[in-house]
Amino acid sequence: MERKLLKTLRIKHKLTQQDLSEKLDISTIYVRKLEKGVANPGRETMIKYENFFETDMRKLFPDLFFEFDDKKCIKNHKQAI
């Protein structure tokens, strides 16, 4: 799942992925992977993003914080069959 808000905020601050990586002290490749959603950040990285962009990490990384009720999903799937 692509994390569009990360890219939007980076562009809004007129930063390249390399600029942001230097400011957050992480690799450019890691910034790219986080934006694309192919890598998940650790707690320390989420805090760096949250502090830098002054935005709650739940908004920055919604795919890591969404609520998912697996039992409800299975029940709904069985009813559909």
Image (cartoon, rainbow, N blue to C red):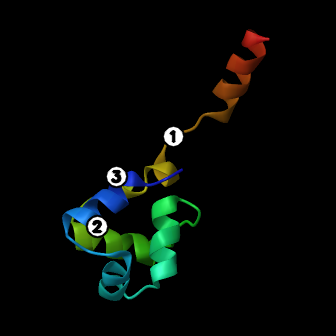
Q: Nearer the viewer, residue 55 or 7?
A: 7
Vertical comparison of 71 with 33: above or below:
above
- Looking at the rendered structure, the secondary structure element under dot 2 is helix
Percent across and percent down for residue 67 are 51, 40
Q: Position of residue 21 (x, y in %)?
A: 38, 82
* Residue drawn at point x = 37 percent, y = 82 percent: 18
Q: Which residue is mark 2?
A: 10
* Residue in the image at 73% along x and 20% along y: 77
Label 2 and label 1: CA atoms lie apart by: 26 Å
Q: Residues within 10 Å of mark 3 (few under 14, many from 20)?
A: some
Look at the image and tell me whether residue 46 can be seen: yes
Q: Residue 69 appears at what percent x and percent y?
A: 60, 34
Where is mark 1, residue-wise? 67
What is the CA distance from the residue labelled 3 to the residue labelled 2?
A: 14 Å
| Residue 21 against residue 61 in the figure, above or below | below
**Residues at marks 1 and 3, CA–CA distance in whole angstroms:** 13 Å
Q: Earlier in the sequence, mark 1 or mark 3?
A: 3
Judge whether 25 appears above or below 64 on screen: below
Camera-near label (3 vs 2) is: 2
Q: Is residue 41 visible?
A: no
Amino acid at the residue labelled 3? Lys
The quadrant in which the C terminus is found is: top right
Amino acid type of disc 1?
Glu
Q: Which of label 1 and label 3 is nearer to you?
A: 3
Picture mark count: 3
Residue topped by disc 3: 59
Residue 73: which quarter of the image? top right
